[in-house]
Amino acid sequence: MHLYYNLCNLLTSIKKESRKTKEDLMITMCLLHICLVMLFSIEISSLDCTMLHFQQNKMNMESLELLSKMGGQFPLQCLNENRNFRLPQKFLKLRQKENAKVEIQEILQLIFYIFTKNLTLAAWDGRSLERFQNGLNQQIEHLEACLTEKMEKKQPYSRSEEIIRLKLKKYFQKIDNFLKDKQYSLCSWEIIRLEMRRCLQYKHFDLRIGIRKKYIF
């Protein structure tokens, strides 16, 4: 914003002092173009944050589709290894809107962290996996930018909210430990792929992001 005003002030001074030579006119037009681009970018950024729910909905739907596409059907040989990680039933049901946004960002960061582990034995489509990782990163950055822009601060968590957050951290720690114990085997990754779909389409996550469509393997 400060850069925009500085450029426009510079443009005004040039217009006052210019002798209207061809070179001065070119400089003026160039700076005018930059000012307009800056103004347009600021307006678009503001619009992006007001449309946050719709954008996150779209990106989250894409993440679910990519999770399905990257590995296809759940392997039959992995059925006996399936495990219940006990996803906290009230996660994201936070009273403060700001806290919910921050918590969504933290969950996406934890999911992104999981999918940067040793994926050598995961028989997944590399392009779909890369798009999934990039999509998560974009969601994280977008949420961070909007939270910063609106100067939204985390409100003090209530005791019940703190308990939910601790359960969430334990949930992701169990997933991390499970992958390590199974030495990042094909079946362990398939189980986690299924679990992350459950996490992303969970009803309280849906309420905050706006997801309606459900996916199954």
Image (tube, helix red, strand yellow):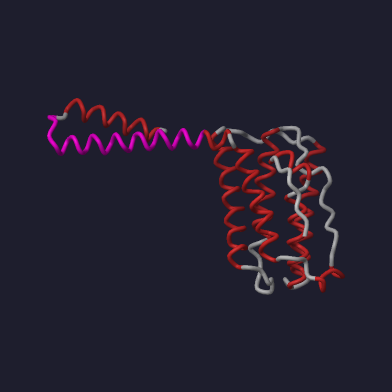
Q: Residue at x 65, y 73 (%)?
A: 120
Answer with left or right where residue 133 lies relative to residue 36: right
Range of the magenta residues? 19-46
In the displayed structure, 91 sits above or below 79; it is above
Q: Closer to the camera, 147 or 215?
A: 215
Image quadrant where one finds the C terminus: bottom right
Q: Where is residue 179 in the image (x, y as percent from the top left)?
A: 75, 67
For the point 69% across and 37% down, which residue is it?
99
For the stretch drawn in magenta, the main secondary structure is helix
Name the residue located 78 percent from the left edge and 65 percent from the top edge. 178
Residue 119 sits in quarter: bottom right
In the image, 168 versus 213, the foreground residue is 213
Would you say residue 170 sits in the magenta stretch?
no
| Farthest right residue in view | 80
Q: Is residue 208 above or below residue 5?
A: below
Which quadrant of the view contains residue 155?
A: top right
Residue 6: percent from the left, percent from the top? 33, 32
